[in-house]
Image: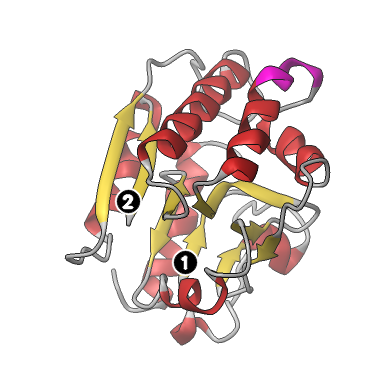
Amino acid sequence: MKVYTFFTDSHKSLLDIFLKNFPYSDNIELNIKWFPQECKTGSYMTEGWTSTMRKKVEYIIQSLKETPENEWFVHSDCDIVLFDGWTDILEKYKDDVDMMIQNDHTTLCAGFFFCRSNSRTKELWKLVYENLDKFEHDQVAMNFYLTKVQGFKAAILPNSYFTYGYYKKGVWNGEKFTIPDIENLKMFHANWTAGVKNKIELTHKVLTDKSLL
């Protein structure tokens, strides 16, 4: 199975963390794509961010085309750390759904998901791409069109695919917190915080708590 991630220069340090902790195995092929730095700050919804997200959607569509029919791939933002056993859930749902998507508190997350390449997922991301300018960003568009593609089935990943936003229902600003059942964590996503510096600090906290740093 292929894992697709991408980065801009502002996020290179996050990519380094992603790569250092990536659980390499013989049946996982990692694909990394560099995007030009159109968002000068590298921060959520600042100038140039939506242009980068359009390139991300193009990358997802490319991933769908490269993946054989009915086979699975993973899209992962680079502000993520994967832990042992992170693919185990695929065996539970792979024959029943089209995508398995991280729970992102108020919505489903376009930053991490398992995706089967088929006519429904191709239609979904074609709709997202063609109508992206009608929405605030790609995640809003994805969630809207998940309900518009006939027969589309999505599963929500459990909370062991962790984001601070879901756990604390808000943005992390340096507060202390403890992840429940951290020994069984399968993935950590450093969203729901502002700026690359905070993303790195948040990721380092989780790696420290898991005795990996």
Q: How is the image coloured?
A: secondary structure
Residue type for callout 1: Met
Residue type for callout 2: Lys
Q: Residue visible at 58% across and 77% down?
A: 179
Report the disc number at residue 187: 1
Who is closer to the viewer here, 33 or 18? 33
Q: Overall secondary structure of the magenta stretch? A: helix
Who is closer to the viewer here, 168 or 15? 15
Magenta stretch? Answer: 130-134
Residue 26 pos. (x, y %): 17, 65
Specify whether residue 193 is in view. Answer: no
Q: Residue visible at 50% across and 76% down?
A: 89
Residue 72 pos. (x, y %): 44, 55
Vertical arrangement, residue 75 with respect to residue 85, above or below: above
Q: How would you rate the neighbour count of disc 2 (Cα within 10 Å): few for under 14, some for 14-19, many for 20 or more?
A: some
Q: Which residue is mark 2?
A: 2
Rendering quarter of residue 85: bottom left
Who is closer to the viewer here, 149 or 49? 149
Residue 151 pos. (x, y %): 76, 53
Residue 169 pos. (x, y %): 78, 61
- Is residue 117 part of the magenta span, yes or no? no
